[in-house]
Image: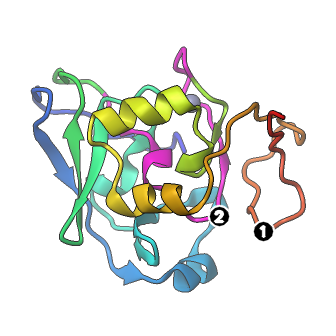
C-alpha cells in the first residue's frame, strides 16, 4: 500500500524504540472475516491474535524489503525499533513478513528497494539469508519463531504466475510457489 506513509520527525539511533502499534484485538478467524485484502491494515502479533486497523500513524507504516525498523512483540504489546540509524525525514518501514505466519494473505510488493523480493508472504517463505539477518537483529517475534519450528521453512524461487495480482489468499487455488528439489 502506497496510499499514505509515515516519516520520522526526528532521528532515531539504531536499537531505539520508534512506535507502538495500537488497535483492537482479533482472532485469526475474526481477522479473515473482517479484512479487506486489497487494503490490509491488520497486524499479526500472536499465532491466533491480530491487531486491527487504527486511525493513527501506526496504521500507515509501509512494508519494505529493505526496512529501517524491526518488529518486537513483548507481553502482548507490539512495537517497532530502529534496526539502523534513521534520519529526520526518512520513511519508517518494516518488513511485514517478519510478523506473518497466517497462511492467508499475500501481496505483490512494490517497495522499490534493490533487494525487493517481489511478494510479501509468511516469514517461512523468506530466503534463508534474509530470515537469518532478521533473527540476528532480534526482529522476529516469538510466535513466528515457534511456527518456523513447527512448519518446515520453504526455500526456492517464487514465480509470479498471475501478473498484476494484488494478492492471493493462500487458501485459494492460485499458489505460485515452486520449491527447489
Ligand atoms: Zn519489496
Left or right of residue 141: residue 29: right
Residue 129: x and y in percent read 50, 26
- Residue 15's place in the image compared with 18, above or below, is above
* Residue 43 appears in view: yes
Number of marks in picture = 2
- Tell which quarter ligand 1 is in: top right
Q: CA distance from mark 1 to mark 2?
A: 7 Å
Residue position marked by numbered label 2 in the rendering: 103
Residue at image position (23%, 72%) is 76
Left or right of residue 18: residue 96: right
Residue 166: x and y in percent read 73, 48
Q: Quadrant of residue 59?
A: bottom left
Query: Which badge, 1 or 2, is on the more N-terminal residue?
Result: 2
Residue 161: x and y in percent read 90, 39
The colour scheme applied to this rendered structure is rainbow
- Residue 47's place in the image compared with 87, above or below, is below
Q: Quadrant of residue 94?
A: top left
The span shown in magenta is 91-115
Left or right of residue 109: residue 171: right
Element assignment for label 2: loop
Quarter holding the C terminus?
top right
Residue at image position (16%, 24%) is 88
Residue position marked by numbered label 1 in the rendering: 171
- Residue 51's place in the image compared with 94, above or below, is below
Q: Is residue 50 magenta?
A: no
24 or 135: nearer the eye? 135
Residue at image position (27%, 60%) is 56
SS majority, magenta: loop
The answer to whether marks 1 and 2 mark residues whose Cβ atoms lie closer than 8 Å is yes
Amino acid at each position: 500500500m502506497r496510499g499514505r506513509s509515515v516519516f520520522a520527525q526526528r532521528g532515531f539511533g539504531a536499537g531505539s524504540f520508534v512506535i507502538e502499534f495500537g488497535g483492537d484485538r482479533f482472532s485469526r478467524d475474526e481477522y479473515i472475516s473482517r479484512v479487506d485484502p486489497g487494503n490490509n491494515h491488520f497486524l499479526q502479533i500472536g499465532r491466533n491474535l491480530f491487531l486491527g486497523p487504527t486511525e493513527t500513524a501506526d496504521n500507515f507504516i509501509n512494508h519494505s524489503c529493505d526496512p529501517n525498523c524491526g518488529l518486537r512483540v513483548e507481553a502482548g504489546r507490539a512495537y517497532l525499533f530502529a534496526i539502523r540509524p534513521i534520519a529526520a525525514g526518512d520513511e519508517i518501514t518494516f518488513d511485514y513478513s517478519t510478523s506473518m505466519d497466517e497462511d492467508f494473505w499475500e501481496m505483490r510488493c512494490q517497495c522499490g528497494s534493490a533487494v525487493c523480493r517481489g511478494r510479501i508472504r509468511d516469514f517461512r517463505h523468506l530466503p534463508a539469508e534474509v530470515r537469518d539477518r532478521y533473527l540476528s537483529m532480534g526482529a522476529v517475534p516469538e510466535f513466528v519463531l515457534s511456527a518456523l519450528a513447527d512448519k518446515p521453512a520453504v526455500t526456492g524461487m517464487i514465480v509470479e504466475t498471475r501478473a498484476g495480482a494484488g494478492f492471493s489468499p493462500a487458501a485459494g487455488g492460485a499458489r505460485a510457489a515452486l520449491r527447489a528439489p
